[in-house]
Amino acid sequence: MAAGRNKIRCIFFSEFHPVAGPKITFQVPEDYISQKLFDSVHIYIITKPQLQNKLITLDALGHRIIGCPVCIENAKYSRNALLFNLCFVFGSDADSQRYEPVVKKLAGYLTTLEMETGFLSDEQSKLKLPEVMKELLTQLNTCGTCSVPINESNTLHLKVVPTSEEPQVVLEHHVPVFLQDKESFVSSQWDLTTQQILPYIDGFNHVMRIAQEADVDINLVRICVQNMLYYGVITLLPIFQYSNVYVCTPDVHSLVQDARLQGECLAYVSKHPGSTPPRFRDVFVLYCGLGAGTTVRDLCTRHAAQLQNVDERRLIQFGLTKGLIRRVKKYPVKLTASDFGSARPWTRWMTGLHSYDEICCKTGMTYQELEDKVESDPHIVVCWK
């Protein structure tokens, strides 16, 4: 359903009349677009060849108009061409971007209908347009989709797809995690490359390891993961290690207040799925045991009793996915520039902008090897953030 300010205010059909020139033939509701407004913008509605078959959005006199001018050339038409445009009208402050594919599809559909059946050039069949436009306006504003019969053999199907923000950039050290059961997806839903990497997305393998184990180019894996991220199928988490440090966020309190979230959490973190789930008290104590200076290894040592029925890796994974906890990462900083670009090329990553995870993936070093190098160099300090 379209929000108030984003609703379609009017749909109008404009064409080039061989005598009268550009005009509005039909509009719903009637007389919404004044003659004064149309006269001031008609050169962008019925356009020159350079702008034909292109989406045009224009703001004029408090209205935003989206159209896609069409020209069908054929000797059977007066002046050897049929020029028309079916436009959507919004308020000047509307977010109309999501309707652009709909307008483009409508232009293509009417072009095909005209070329196959003469729908627009036949005055009798063209009279069906106002009813079609009325249904478009009502259904798209009400539910964002429409199914409008044109004739016995043609039905118009449209859907307004909400615009999404660009997903975050996928890096080699990111760990993709499914937000719903992976088994619920049919493999044919995905392209061949995605099908090839799916078995290796287990919530713990990072992107580079997935590429290596699936024997797929790292850039293709990143594209596939970013595509799944765009559609909300997965989220990205940092690499899990027992030396990692996590802290609780204010949202951890929602675990106490939300019974549904509690049940989801206990089922997810259980060490033995299908058996008796762990006690909520034990799980909450584990989350509260996380903090600055406490690694996962420390947590396991201090709370061995609470971890008897809890998988600590899935505990961390669930907390990150739901925003109950966050990772505190280590960023090494080289205080002197003397070694940059020297025989120790790994030092070029010591700028404070690259985390341990990223440096390990870029250089091929293990976490412990990197830790040893940092600890042995008095000119490197580590920032936690």
Image (cartoon, rainbow, N blue to C red):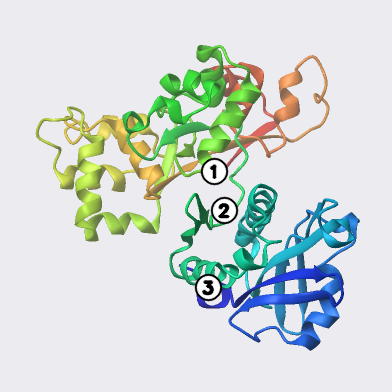
First in sequence: mark 1 vs mark 2: 2
Q: Nearer the viewer, mark 2 or mark 3?
A: 3
Towards the viewer: 126 or 231 = 126
**Front disc: 1 or 3:** 3
Give the number of the disc on residue 230. 1
Q: Are marks 1 and 2 in contact (CB under 8 Å)?
A: yes
State the residue position of label 2: 164
Q: Which residue is mark 3?
A: 134
Residue 382 in sight: yes
Q: Position of residue 62 (x, y in %)?
A: 72, 83
282 left or right of 85?
A: left
**Mark-to-mark CA distance, 1 and 2:** 8 Å
State the separation of the CA atoms marked 1 and 3: 33 Å
Q: Residue at x 60, y 29 (%)?
A: 222
Amino acid of disc 2: Ser
Relative to 288, say whether 194 is above or below. above
Percent x, y for residue 8?
A: 58, 73
Does residue 193 lie above or below 246 as drawn?
above
